[in-house]
Image (spheres, helix red, strand yellow):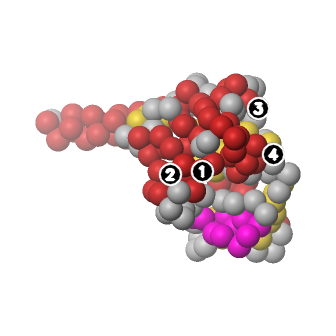
């Protein structure tokens, strides 16, 4: 009888977890699909540099708007791997236009989940390019069966390390490199 009760409890727990859990943990924080991109990102310890940059560029209201947007969000480590002084330079008020260009290069209009991008890659016979809000292009390729890489116009490649962080105004994919426009 005890094993039957334990088995039922495990089945209920698995069913509840898999069916109703809609949030993803990023940077030790829950990301809720009922919140917008900014309201979720500010809670991620892995994206504090990105959030500071979004604020400095004046993009908070844009990323809180209806969207939908697909954001490729570089982690703090991605920013730390840029050449020394890069982050400090682009965060200066006189470089706001450059910062805005870099950040909007990480955003695509519309909501593109892993499955959407993977299907587009398959349709494109191994790769697909998508236009960013900044006007540039990002190229996506499969890297194995369950990984996608993103290549910027300068040839830099980022790996998507966390997929499908759903937001009420789009989706975020966390990446391990900062993408740079031409």
Residue 138 is situated, as x and y percent measured from the top left of the image, at 76, 61
Can you identify the residue that label 4 sits on? Answer: 133
Please say whether residue 1 is one of the residues in the magenta stretch: no
Residue to which mark 1 is pinned:
89
> Residue 169 bears which disc, if any?
none
Q: Which residues are magenta?
A: 149-162
Pair 1/4: label in front? 1
User: Is there a contact, CB below 8 Å, between mark 1 and mark 3?
Assistant: no
What residue would you read off at disc 3? 67
Q: In this image, 44 relative to 52: left or right?
A: left
C-beta proximity under 8 Å, tags 3 and 2: no
Specify which label sits upstream in the sequence, 1 or 4.
1
The answer to whether residue 114 shows anywhere in this view is: yes
Q: Is residue 61 above or below residue 109?
A: above
Q: Identify the image quadrant of the C terminus.
A: bottom right
Residue 34 vertical position relative to residue 119 in the rendered view, above or below = above
Rate crowding at label 4 as few (under 14), some (14 to 19) or many (20 or more) other CA atoms within 10 Å: some
At a point 51% along the width and 44% down the height, the residue shown is 49
Q: Nearer the viewer, residue 5 or 57?
A: 57
Please tell me whether mark 3 or mark 4 is closer to you in this view.
4
Element type at mark 3: loop
Q: Are marks 1 and 2 in contact (CB under 8 Å)?
A: no
Task: Check the image and name the residue furthest to the front.
Answer: 94
Residue that label 2 marks: 75
> Tag 2 or tag 3, which sits nearer the N-term?
3
């Amino acid at each position: 009888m005890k094993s039957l009760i334990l088995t039922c409890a495990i089945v209920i727990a698995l069913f509840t977890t898999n069916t109703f859990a809609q949030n993803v943990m990023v940077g030790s924080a829950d990301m809720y699909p009922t919140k917008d991109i900014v309201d979720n990102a500010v809670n991620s310890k892995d994206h504090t540099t990105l959030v500071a940059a979004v604020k400095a560029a004046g993009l908070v209201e844009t990323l809180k708007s209806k969207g939908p947007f697909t954001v490729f969000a570089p982690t703090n480590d991605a920013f730390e791997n840029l050449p020394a002084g890069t982050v400090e330079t682009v965060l200066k008020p006189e470089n706001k236009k450059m910062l805005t260009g870099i950040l909007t290069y990480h955003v695509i209009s519309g909501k593109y989940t892993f499955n959407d991008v993977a299907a587009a890659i398959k349709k494109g016979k191994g790769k697909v390019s998508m236009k960013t809000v900044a006007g540039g292009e990002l190229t996506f390729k499969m890297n194995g069966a369950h990984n996608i890489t993103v290549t910027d116009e300068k040839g830099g490649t980022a790996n998507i390390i966390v997929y499908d962080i759903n937001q009420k105004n789009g989706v975020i994919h966390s990446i391990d490199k900062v993408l740079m426009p031409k």
